[in-house]
Image (tube, rainbow, N blue to C red):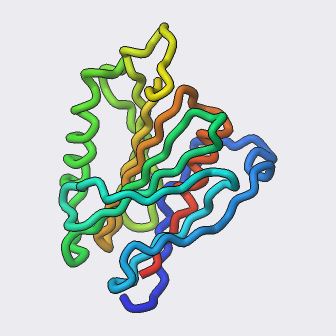
């Protein structure tokens, strides 16, 4: 693909109506993270000012031969954590919608025994070329009791597959959802570009 710039619009969250002026109150910095210079693979995204970003060894992703992780945290006075994992199938091989669904189901089904929800209520996301969905689960062990500092009440998982072989999933942990931090997290995800 050479220097061709491929924009991956990960998530189109048309189901969320952001309050006017919400994001304008938080300045965003466009940052590029180079994972593999030899293969010219980098990710560009908007990060809210004062949010911390760290790179970690990639979490293994089924169907991929390589993956990278970014850990993104809001300021220390906000208890939340966003982990974005990016992987690619060998040689960019395409997967079917059924394979993608199996990947999503396998990750979510292992969490359901610990969730308040009996089934995952998926919301589909609009992708330029591929498939995407997300859901939020509630930790049943933390309902109606004080939440320890290193634990979170809600887990929101996002999954996306693109026909060029990229698989992206994100895990957002928080004690509250439907607040400014949650919407900023959505904005981070929707801003991602992959430059190949």
**Residue at left offset 47%, top offset 41%:** 172
- Along the line of sight, which residue is nearer the eye, 22 or 174? 174
Residue 42, position as x, y percentages in the image: 44, 75
Would residue 194 be found to the left or right of residue 180 on screen? Answer: left
Residue in the picture at 75% in, 56% down: 27
**Residue lying farthest bottom?**
2
* Percent coordinates x, y for residue 98 in the rendering: 20, 52
Classify 178 as above or below 74.
above
Q: Percent x, y for residue 123? A: 43, 40
- Depicted 194 relative to depicted 46: above or below: below
- Residue at 66% x, 54% y: name it: 48
Does 20 sit left or right of 117 as displayed? right
Query: Quarter of the image containing the N terminus?
Result: bottom left
Considering every residue shown, the one lying at the far top of the view is 144
Image quadrant assignment for residue 110: top left
Would residue 108 be found to the left or right of residue 19 on screen? left
The image shows residue 100 at horizontal and vertical percentages of 25, 53
């Amino acid at each position: 693909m050479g220097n061709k710039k491929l924009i991956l619009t990960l998530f189109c969250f048309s189901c969320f109506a952001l309050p006017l002026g919400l994001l304008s109150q938080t300045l965003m910095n466009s940052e590029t993270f180079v994972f593999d210079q030899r293969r010219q693979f980098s990710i560009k995204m908007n990060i809210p000012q004062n949010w911390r970003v760290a790179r970690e060894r990639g979490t293994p992703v089924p169907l991929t031969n390589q993956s990278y992780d970014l850990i993104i945290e809001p300021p220390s006075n906000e208890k939340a954590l966003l982990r974005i994992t990016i992987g690619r199938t060998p040689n960019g091989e395409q997967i079917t919608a059924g394979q993608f669904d199996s990947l999503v189901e396998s990750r979510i089904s292992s969490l359901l025994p610990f969730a308040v929800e009996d089934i995952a209520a998926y919301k589909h996301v609009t992708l330029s070329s591929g498939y995407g969905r997300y859901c939020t689960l509630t930790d049943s062990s933390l309902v109606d009791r004080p939440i320890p500092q290193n634990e979170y009440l809600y887990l929101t998982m996002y999954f996306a597959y693109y026909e060029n072989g990229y698989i992206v999933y994100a895990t957002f942990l928080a004690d509250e959802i439907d607040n400014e931090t949650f919407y900023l997290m959505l904005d981070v995800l929707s801003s991602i570009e992959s430059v190949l």
